[in-house]
Amino acid sequence: MSEKHKVKGYSEEAYPPMPTNTTKFWRKFIPYQVIRFFVLNIKILKIVVGGHS
């Protein structure tokens, strides 16, 4: 790896990006989380039921 592509510890590049305000909003918005919960469970059920037929 060349010198200019090395990432030094504790530098700005070593940390993950901060979530935007929009991302933080959707993570805390309970109605959205409930919908995502059911969508995920339906996807899992389709996989499980499909494997048993």
Image: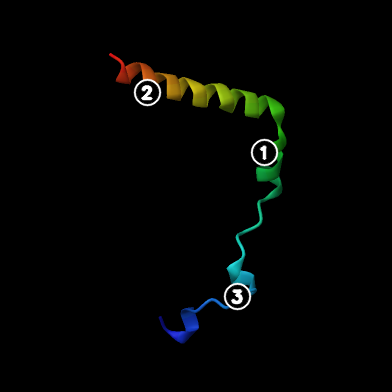
Among the two numbered marks 1 and 3 on one chain, the one whose residue lies closer to the N terminus: 3
Identify the amino acid type marked 3. Answer: Gly
Look at 42% across and 84% down and name the residue there.
Answer: 2
Image coordinates of residue 12 in percent, x first then y, are: 64, 71
| Badge 3 or badge 2: first in the primary sequence | 3
Return the residue at label 3. Answer: 9
C-alpha gap between disc 3 and disc 2: 42 Å
What residue lies at 70% left-to-right and 44% top-to-bottom? 24
Q: Position of residue 46 (x, y in %)?
A: 39, 19
Q: Amino acid at mark 2?
A: Ile
Question: For mark 1, what is the residue?
Answer: 27
Quarter of the image where the C terminus is located: top left
Q: Nearer the viewer, residue 47 or 22?
A: 47
Label 1: few (<14), some (14–19) or many (≥20) C-alpha neighbours in 10 Å: few
Given this view, does label 1 or label 3 mark the residue nearer the observer?
Answer: 3
**How is the rendered protein coloured?**
rainbow
Does dot 1 land on a helix, a strand or a loop?
Answer: helix
Q: Name the quadrant containing residue 43.
A: top left
Task: Find out whether the residues at labels 1 and 3 contact each other: C-beta distance under 8 Å.
Answer: no
Q: Choose between 50 and 23: the one closer to the eye.
A: 50
Quarter-of-image position of residue 36: top right
Identify the amino acid type marked 1. Arg
Q: As drawn, is 30 to the left or to the right of 35?
A: right
Residue 33 left/right relative to 4: right
**On the image, which quarter does residue 9 sit in?**
bottom right
Indicate whether 47 appears above or below 27.
Answer: above
Q: Is residue 7 above or below residue 46?
A: below
Q: Which mark sits nearer the N-terminus, 1 or 2?
A: 1
Does residue 46 lie above or below 16 as drawn?
A: above
Q: Residue at x 63, y 74 (%)?
A: 11
The residue under label 2 is 47
